[in-house]
Amino acid sequence: MTQDNYEPIKAQIIEMCRRLEKMGYFIGTWGNISVRVPKGFIVTPSRVPYDVIETDDFVVVSSEGKVIAGHRLPSSETEIHRAVLNKKNNLGAIIHSHSPYATAVSCLHRRIPPFVEDMAQIIGGQVDCTRYVPAGQHKKIADEVAQTIGEANAVLLANHGVLCGGRDLEEAFTASQILEKAALMMLAAGTLGPVISIPEEFVRSERDRFLHKYGTVRDAP
Ligand SMILES: [Zn+2]
């Protein structure tokens, strides 16, 4: 029995898992979430269906990878979450899903350039794709993901799925939706030709505007 002050965060994760399952981003327990906490991160457990999961089922893992609270096994993909949270200090929450369009692009081993403004704002740049790592090689895929993720808050996992992060869980959810939409648009536009990225300087300025200025200054007409 685990009692800690993370109950509200765990309840929020449960609600998010159910939302993602309804949206088709999670199928069964294929899909997992982590949220950074002072001692490490909370992660969804392995093989507990999201319609019956309770806050007591969650696991807390240290940044070194040690289970420090919880009686369940952490998600089999915990190493991926740990590798990304350790690499990218700006992220407070991660959603790893198998959302269909982003996964479709991952099967092409293609990157998704920042070709729409919301990608520049929330995701912060080009989303690269890892090399293929066979299922079950958790440490190897974690290393591959950590190596591949760059400035962007997202990465595609070849022939597998996608990982999106944000400063908090709601932002990771928004990033997941934006990337899924971008993947759909890229596949749709791809029937006519390759999508054209926003110039690098405007990707940076949009990201900066989103992080620091949104709602505080009047936009030029
Ligand atoms: Zn997965």
Image: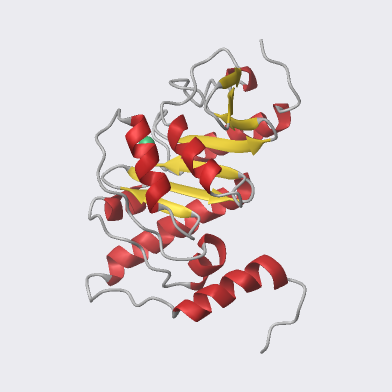
Q: Is residue 89 left or right of residue 177?
A: right
In this view of the protein, can residue 98 be seen by the observer? no
Q: Quadrant of residue 143?
A: top left
Which residue is at the front of the view, 220 or 100?
Answer: 220
Picture quadrant of ligand 1: top left
Placement of the N terminus among the 4 image quadrants: top right
Q: Quadrant of residue 185?
A: bottom left
Residue drawn at 70 percent across, 34 percent down: 38
Placement of the C terminus among the 4 image quadrants: bottom right
Q: How is the image coloured?
A: secondary structure
Q: Is residue 98 above or below residue 7?
A: below
Q: Residue 17 in the image: x percent, y percent? A: 53, 35
Q: Residue furthest top?
A: 1
Q: Residue furthest bottom?
A: 221
Q: Residue 43 in the image: x percent, y percent? A: 55, 30
Residue drawn at 64 percent across, 22 percent down: 55
Q: Is residue 57 above or below residue 166?
A: above
Q: Quadrant of residue 26?
A: top left
Q: Is residue 200 left or right of residue 206?
A: left
Q: Residue 57 in the image: x percent, y percent? A: 58, 18
Q: Residue 63 in the image: x percent, y percent? A: 57, 32
Residue drawn at 51 percent across, 72 percent down: 117
Q: Is residue 206 above or below residue 178?
A: below
